[in-house]
Image (cartoon, rainbow, N blue to C red):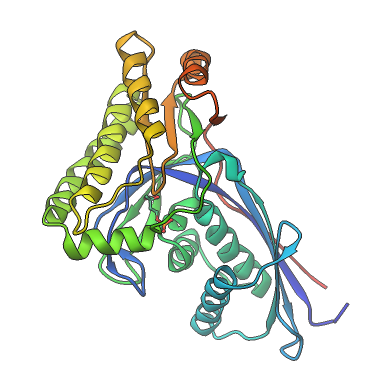
Amino acid sequence: VNSMERTGTATAHTNIALIKYWGKKDEALRLPFTDSISLTLADFYTTTEVTVLDSALPKRFTMNGSPVQGKAADRVWQYIARLQQRFGVRGSLAITTENHVPTSAGLASSSSAFAALAGAFAAAYGLQVDMQELSRMARLGSGSASRSVYGGFARWIAGSDDATSVAVPIDEHPSFALRMIAVQIDVKPKAISSTAGMRRVVETSPYFPVWVEHNVDACERMQQAIADSDFTTLGELAQQNALDMHALNLTARPGFTYFEPQTLQVLQAVDQLRQEGVECYYTMDAGPNVKVLVQPEHEAAVLERLAVVVPDATMLSTGVGPGITMSANGV
Ligand code: PMV
């Protein structure tokens, strides 16, 4: 072991946006047009270890035991170069990531991945960063990652520049029990990345300004629903916001959608369940998979119905997750 080596480790959980971030005002800095609000999840997380090596040694990046190359690796190394420049630090890095986000969950892992990487980087270099700075660092890797430094509910404040665009906690330990069921419909890599989808609506949809204006109000109401532990309002707002985002995609030029036929079957089943008195709501991100929000007493009924409606889909349920944890050991 080289005497200069120092290792930092961080674990961060994925989050699901209840009020979505969908549109960048500044792509390079990842500044969003609007605030967004999310729930951090319990069972889907990333643990990343960063070791600072002598600059003469080659850099390494492995994920779940395999070396990573190509586009995914380029994005990570560009991100690392940016952080090194920002903090005036140097060295070659060995990055080891364990992604505990099953592909079958249909959940994006970039939120937990970049939050964990930012945390491990800070720990490896012994940087004195507070939670807001950590959120800012994570944001530079992936917008949604800014919110994954916190547990429970978090709000990413859009801000107007790098310093002010940062997530803050709303309620890290919510008092009401909330469950989320991830319904995986398709694991094909998506044809339109979140970056490309956002760019297209920003540049071409005549409805984009309406989305922006409306989200300001949606965030205020969601924050109130969380403060009131009001599941009905939270669910209604989350479901409508997801519909707004996916409707916006249809209004781009050319219009596009992430929906697959089975997506609609799940959405209809959720609405039907609610009419029958099983209170549940859906939300969706940049893909065909559906996430269902439900309180524990109705979870089994939702799982049972969806198993009939989409028998081939994988379903995983989880609860509210914690914020980032970090540690360092210099050797
Ligand atoms: O930060 P990204 O590139 O993972 O984009 C996230 C976009 C959505 O998941 C659709 C919404 C959100 O706020 O997380």
306 sits left or right of 278 in the view: right
Q: Residue furthest front?
A: 261
**Residue 218 occupies which quadrant of the picture?**
top left
Residue that lies at the very extreme toward the top in this rendered image: 276
Q: Position of residue 206 (x, y in %)?
A: 11, 56
Is 63 or 147 nearer to us in this picture? 63
Q: How many marks?
A: 0
**Considering depth in this image, is 225 or 236 the residue closer to the camera?**
236
Is 320 rendered above or below residue 198? above
- Where does the image place residue 304, in percent across and percent down from the top left? 52, 15
Check the image and name the residue furthest to the bottom. Answer: 56
Residue visible at 37% across and 63% down in the picture: 195
Q: Residue at x 51, y 44 (%)?
A: 107
271 vs 7: above or below: above
Q: Position of residue 2 (x, y in %)?
A: 85, 81
Residue 329 horizontal side relative to residue 24, left or right? right
